[in-house]
Structure formats: structure tokens, C-alpha cells
């Protein structure tokens, strides 16, 4: 019965970049800081009247990754406001990229990439045993790369291999530690199953923080979807979390669509014409690349 179904997975992977300062301000970017709310300023705290400034090194880091995976670098790009209210977003919106990502296309570990863009991270929510929810804004505004794959993954192992290869590539480029245990790299999997070859109803499983969790969550969701369909139920498009101790997913909320975020260009940030910046040229960026994991493996195997 299970063999009659086709699994389709697309990944969204976030990785914090290791720049000296945050994405739109000069607050220190330090993932090892244990004191709460010390690396903050009026900009990353969303105080009225403050103006963001683009972190050039963060842009360059994403462009270098784009070159490494064979993507197309944007000439024109801009930042957008992704509007939603949540306690870890002090401005009431997140600065991200929507229609004009820094990188389009590319491929890594045999998986085609849709886009790679840049945004700011959120604050960190801490829920203690007393039932209190606390916020640490040290992480708010940290440069966050988001990579989105095409829905071309058809087994959990391929998803795990892709995530591992991306982490390794980020390490080789020196642009991110991507330590999953510390939350510096987070994986989200968009999962569907179908019999007829068309895409089924998509469910997103968020914040998978280990390669093992990525594979286990995908396998669990595949089995859950098939069981629902076989018993006459219906898969609901929603966002789910992963419970590592139970080895199962749980419902969090109905899945939002892009229109729910009311994206529009951020009026406080300039449009970027990247071809006008010499160090953002493809040849200049290629000159900064080290030997990458795939090339190194091929060279060593040929010895």
C-alpha cells in the first residue's frame, strides 16, 4: 500500500550568518552571549523613528553561496516588510525579501534550489517551568539566510543529505557555523504524498534542529498522510511542530499564504543594483571561494 504513494518534499533552511554585527544595525552578532538582552539597540528593538542600514558583508555572504551552488545572482534586489504580529518581532514586521531574492536557481547535492534570500532573525522565546514566556532580543536582527529548494525530494534520506551538504558548504565558505544544536541552522520541511503523481496537500513541519529529526519527521508525516487518506480522512494544510521525545509531529496552526503577510517594499531601505558594486561581480566573488566539499571529494577520490 505504501509503495503506491509518492512522497514529495521541499526544504526551507535558515542559517544565521557569522557577521560581526546584525543585519540592519551595529549591535554585536554574538551567538555565544549568555546574558540576555545585552546585544541590542533601538534599531533591532524596533523603536519608533529608527532607520535600518544594510549589512554589506551579509549580502556578500549570500552572493558567495549563490556562486558556490551555481545560482543566478540578482542585478536588482530589494528588501520587503513581512507583516505579522508575534512577541519576538518588536516592529510588528520582519524585514525579508519576497519578489527579488539575491539568488535564484542553483543546485547542491543533486537537489535543485529555487532561491536564496536574506532577512533578519527574530528574538528568542523562552518558556519556563513557572508558565512564564520570556524574550531574549540578542538574536533579533541577526542576518539570516533562507534557502528554498524545489519540491524535488522524494525520500527522507535525500533531504538529510542535502541539509548536511549545505551545512558543510556554509562552513567551508566561512559564512556560518550553522550549529543546529544552538539553533544557528533550522530546517523546515514541506511534505505531501499522492497517488496520481500530482502534488498532494502540503504540510509544513517547522524548526527541525537535527539531521535525524529531519529524516524522522518526514517519514512520520508520510505515514500519517497515507493513513489519513486510506481511512477516508483528509490532510489539512497546516504548520506542525516536531516532538523529538515522542517521535511525532503535532499541529501548531493553519498554514499561512504569502498574501497573509501583506508584503511590500521597505521604504526605509534603498534598492540595490548589485552589478554596480565591483566586489559583487561574479568573477570577484569566485576569487573568494575556497575548494568546496564536492570538488574536494572528487579530487581525493581521483588520487
Image (tube, grey):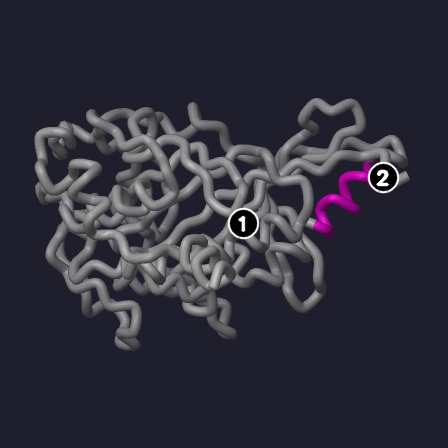
Disc ID at residue 206: 1
Q: Quadrant of residue 98?
A: top left
Q: Is residue 246 magenta?
A: no
**Picture layout, residue 39 above or below residue 188:** below
Label annotation for residue 2: none
Give the secondary structure at mark 2. Answer: helix
Horizontal and vertical percent position of residue 69: 38, 42
N-terminal label among 2 and 1: 2
* Residue at 63%, 33% in the rendered image: 202
Q: Is residue 223 magenta?
A: yes
Pick whichever, 161 or 302, lies toward us: 302
Q: How far apart, in angstroms, are the residues tagged by discs 2 and 1?
A: 26 Å
How many marks are shown on the rendered structure? Answer: 2
Residue 92 image position (x, y, % from top left): 29, 41
Task: Pick the residue in front: 13 or 120.
Answer: 13
Range shown magenta: 219-228
The local crowd at label 1, few if under 14, some if 14 to 19, many if 20 or more residues have their Cα within 10 Å, is many
Of the pair 50 and 159, the residue shown nearer to us? 159
* Residue picked out by circle 2: 3
State the image coordinates of residue 10 (x, y, percent, origin top left): 56, 38
Q: Residue furthest front?
A: 303
The kind of secondary structure element at disc 1 is strand
Q: Residue at x 16, y 39 (%)?
A: 280
Dominant SS type (magenta):
helix
Q: Would residue 2 appear left or right of 127 to someone viewing this image?
A: right
Give coordinates of residue 143: x percent, y percent.
26, 51
Amino acid at each position: 500500500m505504501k509503495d503506491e504513494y509518492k512522497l514529495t518534499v521541499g526544504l526551507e533552511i535558515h542559517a544565521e550568518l557569522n557577521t560581526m554585527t546584525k543585519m540592519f544595525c551595529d549591535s554585536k552578532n554574538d551567538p555565544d552571549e549568555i546574558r540576555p538582552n545585552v546585544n541590542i539597540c533601538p534599531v533591532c528593538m524596533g523603536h519608533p523613528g529608527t532607520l535600518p542600514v544594510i549589512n554589506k558583508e551579509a549580502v556578500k555572504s549570500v552572493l558567495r553561496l549563490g556562486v558556490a551552488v551555481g545560482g543566478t545572482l540578482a542585478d536588482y534586489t530589494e528588501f520587503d516588510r513581512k507583516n505579522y504580529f508575534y512577541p519576538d518581532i518588536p516592529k510588528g514586521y520582519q524585514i525579508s525579501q519576497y519578489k527579488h531574492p539575491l539568488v535564484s536557481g542553483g543546485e547542491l547535492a543533486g537537489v535543485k534550489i529555487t532561491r536564496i534570500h536574506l532577512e533578519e532573525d527574530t528574538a528568542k522565546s523562552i518558556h519556563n517551568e513557572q508558565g512564564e514566556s520570556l524574550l531574549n532580543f540578542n538574536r533579533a536582527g541577526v542576518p539570516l539566510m533562507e534557502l528554498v529548494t524545489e519540491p524535488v525530494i522524494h525520500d527522507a534520506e535525500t533531504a538529510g543529505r542535502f541539509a548536511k551538504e549545505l551545512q558543510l558548504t556554509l562552513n567551508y565558505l566561512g559564512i556560518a557555523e550553522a550549529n543546529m544544536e544552538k539553533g544557528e541552522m533550522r530546517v523546515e520541511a514541506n511534505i505531501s504524498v499522492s497517488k496520481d503523481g500530482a502534488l498532494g496537500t502540503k504540510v509544513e513541519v517547522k524548526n527541525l534542529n537535527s539531521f535525524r529529526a529531519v529524516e524522522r519527521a518526514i517519514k512520520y508525516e508520510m505515514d500519517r498522510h497515507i493513513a489519513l487518506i486510506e481511512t477516508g480522512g483528509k490532510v489539512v494544510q497546516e504548520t506542525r511542530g516536531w516532538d523529538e521525545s515522542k517521535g511525532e509531529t503535532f499541529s501548531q496552526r493553519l498554514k499561512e499564504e504569502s498574501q497573509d503577510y501583506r508584503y511590500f517594499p521597505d521604504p526605509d531601505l534603498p534598492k540595490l543594483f548589485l552589478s554596480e558594486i565591483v566586489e559583487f561581480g561574479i568573477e570577484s566573488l569566485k576569487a573568494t571561494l575556497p575548494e568546496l566539499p564536492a570538488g574536494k571529494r572528487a579530487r581525493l577520490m581521483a588520487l
